[in-house]
Amino acid sequence: MRPTLSKDDRRSYAVYVLLRPAERKLLERVREGRSRGAVLRDAFLAQYPQE
């Protein structure tokens, strides 16, 4: 028997599962309370390091 989820859980779970590991890490940081702008800035700097 498959577990049943509410509509909201089902919708967010499907999106969460499809994320790549780096994107999932960013979402977890946003969920921890960091501002979305700071998380996006950190992600950008990680991908394009300043020399």
Image: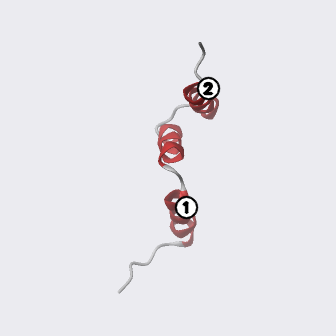
Residue on which disc 1 sits = 12
Quadrant position of residue 15: bottom right
Q: Secondary structure at mark 2?
A: loop
Q: Secondary structure at mark 1?
A: helix
Front-most of residues 24 and 51: 51
Q: Position of residue 4 (x, y in %)?
A: 43, 78
Judged by depth in the image, the label closer to the viewer, 2 or 1, is: 2
Q: Amino acid at mark 2?
A: Tyr
Identity of the residue drawn at 58% across and 30% down:
47
Identity of the residue drawn at 61% across and 26% down:
48
Q: Is residue 10 above or below residue 18?
A: below
Q: Position of residue 14 (x, y in %)?
A: 54, 65
Quarter of the figure that contains the N terminus:
bottom left
Kindly report the distance in space between the C-alpha atoms of the residues bearing marks 2 and 1.
29 Å
Residue found at the far bottom of this picture:
1
Q: Relative to residue 1, is residue 15 drawn left or right?
A: right
State the mark number for residue 48: 2
Identity of the residue drawn at 46% across and 73% down:
5
Quarter of the figure that contains the C terminus:
top right
Graded by Cα atoms within 10 Å as few (under 14), some (14 to 19) or many (20 or more), the crowding at tag 1 reads few
In primary-sequence order, the first of circles 2 and 1 is 1
Q: Position of residue 44 (x, y in %)?
A: 62, 29
Q: Is residue 13 above or below residue 46?
A: below
Identity of the residue drawn at 53% across and 39% down:
30
Q: Position of residue 42 (x, y in %)?
A: 56, 27
Q: Amino acid at mark 1?
A: Ser
Graded by Cα atoms within 10 Å as few (under 14), some (14 to 19) or many (20 or more), the crowding at tag 2 reads few
Q: Relative to residue 21, is residue 7 drawn left or right?
A: right
